[in-house]
Image (cartoon, rainbow, N blue to C red):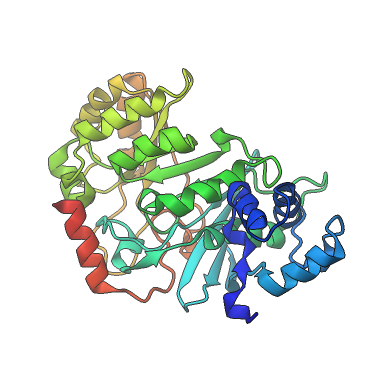
Amino acid sequence: MSDTAKTNLLNHDRRSMQDFFAGIGDQPFRATQVVKWIHQYGVDNFDDMTNLSKELRARLRDIAEIRLPEVELDQVATDGTRKWLLRLMDGNCIETVFIPEEDRGTLCVSSQVGCTLNCTFCATGHQGFNRSLTVDEIISQLLVANRSLGRDPKGERIITNVVFMGMGEPLLNFENVVPAMRLMLDDHAYGLSRRRVTLSTAGVVPMMDRLREACPVSLAVSLHAPNDLLRNELVPLNRKYPIRELLGACRRYCDISPRSRITFEYVMLAGINDGVEHAQELAELLMTVPSKVNLIPFNPFPQTRYRRSSNESIDRFREVLIKAGLTTITRKTRGDDIDAACGQLAGRIQDRTRRRVRIMSQIQS
């Protein structure tokens, strides 16, 4: 069998791995064994999977592989933030970022090559869109980062949290993102808790409801405006799913657990959405949703028309929300000296313009 016809086992969560082994006439329990070898132990050589028979190992060598993307660039910022540029098989490149903190290590992963949504303040949207990532391309980001970072002195993995806040809109790649998240949550793979895996969406309302049923991880919503008129400008998806519908989906999502709450992300743009009146409107808007608010200082990129709000403006905005009873923090900018900060990820994308126009027209219709 040629290499091009081999199955990349990184494309399978444990459920589909069971189907793979059933399809080759083997027992379903092999799925658990192989998932543990790949994701817990980082093994990519079938010969090293010693609890598999020699016959099965030989067969896997013939029909399967464990193929990671190539690391084209590995950068470390002055604050310890680390960014990998990963080259995919088709020549596109995506970016993945690790953010170290005292009490956690967070990996920010991408879900698409570029993004269709064209949020006006985001570098990724300005780069165009090519395609959605496959399961293996998503989970490979975690594997590559784990290999690069190693383990702490106690032997624990350094990555404790994963956020889908990199390139792309995760809910427009639902069929691949969910199996990748299941691997992250699987005790036989990475064993992360649901509260340590966060999916960020611009508000694809029907898919938020599907996610609540299929894999209810922590949810973050890129809001960025307190009313439809302004949000239509900043987040074009709002024309399809306006704020009222979005907040309805948020309330339904919170029904999964009495302790559930939504993180609302709000990028601070000078003179655009950072006034006291905006903060007051936002506070009133969120009163009916269990929530917390992350204020994100804007991170500029070439050709942008926006400016970062002053620290004084951000502080005033935050105080209004706190006085209204909303848990509010200002996110610290990390990795901006290597373009690894929020909204700066761009990668290298072969933009398929017509496909992007078609998808955007479907969203806006």
For the point 45% across and 43% down, the residue is 199
- Nearest the viewer among 55 and 188 is 55
Q: Quadrant of the N terminus?
A: bottom right
- Seen as rendered, the residue at the extreme bottom is 2
For the point 34% across and 42% down, the residue is 207
Is any atom of residue 319 visible in this view?
Answer: no
- Please tell me whether residue 222 is drawn above or below residue 306 in the rendered image: above
- Please tell me whether residue 314 is drawn above or below residue 42 in the rendered image: above
- Nearest the viewer among 114 and 178 is 178
Residue 190 on image: x %, y %? 67, 46
- Nearest the viewer among 348 and 120 is 348
For the point 43% across and 26% down, the residue is 261
Q: Which picture quadrant has residue 243?
A: top left
- Nearest the viewer among 215 and 335 is 215
- Please tell me whether residue 256 is drawn above or below residue 10 in the rendered image: above
Horizontal arrangement in the rendering, residue 292 relative to residue 47 (left or right)? left
Horizontal arrangement in the rendering, residue 151 relative to residue 237 (left or right)? right
Horizontal arrangement in the rendering, residue 33 relative to residue 350 (left or right)? right
Is any atom of residue 158 visible in this view?
Answer: yes
Residue 34 on image: x %, y %? 73, 55
- Please tell me whether residue 217 is drawn above or below residue 289 in the rendered image: below
Tally the numbered discs: 0
Residue 50 on image: x %, y %? 87, 59
- Seen as rendered, the residue at the extreme front is 25
Residue 31 on image: x %, y %? 70, 51
